[in-house]
Amino acid sequence: MVQAIGPALPNIPWEDRPAGCHDVVWRSSQNPIIPRNRIPSANSIFNSAVVPFHGAFAGVFRVDHRTRAMRLHRGWSPDGLNWQIDEQPIAFVCEVPELRTIEYAYDPRVCWLEDRYYITWCNGYHGPTIGLGYTFDFETFYQLENAFLPYNRNGVLFPRKINGRYAMLSRPSDAGHTPFGDIFYSESPDLCFWGRHRHVMGPTREWSWQSTKVGAGPTPIETTAGWLLFYHGVLTSCNGFVYSMGAALLDPEEPWKVRARTAPYLLSPQELYECVGDTPNVVFPCAALCDPPTGRIAIYYGAADTVTCLAYARVDEVVSFLLEQPL
Ligand code: BMA
């Protein structure tokens, strides 16, 4: 049986698959777990990233303010379900003067790597690109150089070095709503200089849930069968973009090689809170917790660019489903 590799997380949020449900991924009965107005300044709280932290959970949240400024806020939770989010945005310590003016910051991912929590996000620097920073304690946050030139989005670090180098997925884009997009893999010796770029995967067929663009979601989960990557895929309907979630299995040592990929989506906007909001018809995963001994996965996703939701799956079931798919 395929298993995840990593430390146990016995307090992972969890609900069994509801009776009568045959889906590979199922929703939390408590969705949305974070309402749009959890803090007074917020217009919406969505597309956010959480990690286990000191027996509880910590996170970096996308909060779009009532001014519509897009900012990153810290959050805490005893159980991964009930979140307390700071009123003030994270103030990164940054030694690079040119990077200090935050135009905007959104869609964070958080990745435990070696000795600290790294944060990647879409950073406004003459257009969207990949911001990078870290924290040891979720008290002080440090900002590093942007990883790439504009325009780029969906920067997602791997949780360990691969072949002796840091590794990141990203999705080169344009400065607007980007009607295209492929996932690429890049390597770095020092998290500053990135190169050896490899193509991972692009959209598929003319009319599919992932026919317009794809972008990496949560930090990939290492399994005995390779890296399990949840990602979003976009279809252009007559009413605009529809964002759904799928998964891929990437080669363990050469992750730009896709071993399997879902043909049907695993989660698509169907519940009211996914279909109605500031941007209708969006599910957008940015974090996944995993408990390797039980194979439980808890996926955090933004819904309709408005609220934060949770869905569940099992490692062996997702990988078995993936391995049934024709490439
Ligand atoms: C993408 C990003 C996401 C957003 C999605 C749907 O381009 O801006 O933050 O969830 O569009 O609007």
Image (cartoon, rainbow, N blue to C red):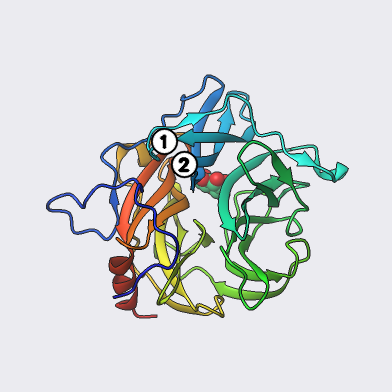
Density class for disc 1 (Cα within 10 Å; few <14, some 14-19, many ≥20) is some
Residue type at mark 2 is Phe
Q: Residue at x 29, y 43 (%)?
A: 28
Which of 79 and 283 lies nearest the eye of the viewer? 79
Question: At which x and y percent is residue 283?
Answer: 42, 48
Q: Earlier in the sequence, mark 2 or mark 1?
A: 2
Residue type at mark 1 is Pro
Question: At which x and y percent is residue 226?
Answer: 45, 75
Measure how far apart labels 2 and 1 are at the Cα level: 6 Å
**Residue 301 appears in view:** yes
Q: Are marks 2 and 1 in contact (CB under 8 Å)?
A: yes
Quadrant containing the N terminus in the rendered view: bottom left
Quadrant containing the C terminus in the rendered view: bottom left
Q: Residue 71: name its quadrant.
A: top right
**Residue 282 appears in view:** no
Question: At which x and y percent is residue 309?
Answer: 38, 41
Q: Which residue is mark 2?
A: 57
Q: Residue furthest right?
A: 97
Secondary element at tag 2: strand
Q: Along the horizontal axis of the image, is 142 left or right of 25? A: right
Which of 306 and 132 lies nearest the eye of the viewer? 132
Q: Residue at x 44, y 43 (%)?
A: 55
Q: Which residue is mark 1?
A: 78
Decide: is 306 above or below 291.
above
Which of 172 and 95 lies nearest the eye of the viewer? 95
Q: Residue furthest front?
A: 54
Density class for disc 2 (Cα within 10 Å; few <14, some 14-19, many ≥20) is many
Q: Is mark 1 within 8 Å of ligand 1?
A: no
Secondary element at tag 1: loop
Decide: is 135 above or below 162.
above
Q: Along the horizontal axis of the image, is 236 left or right of 92? A: left
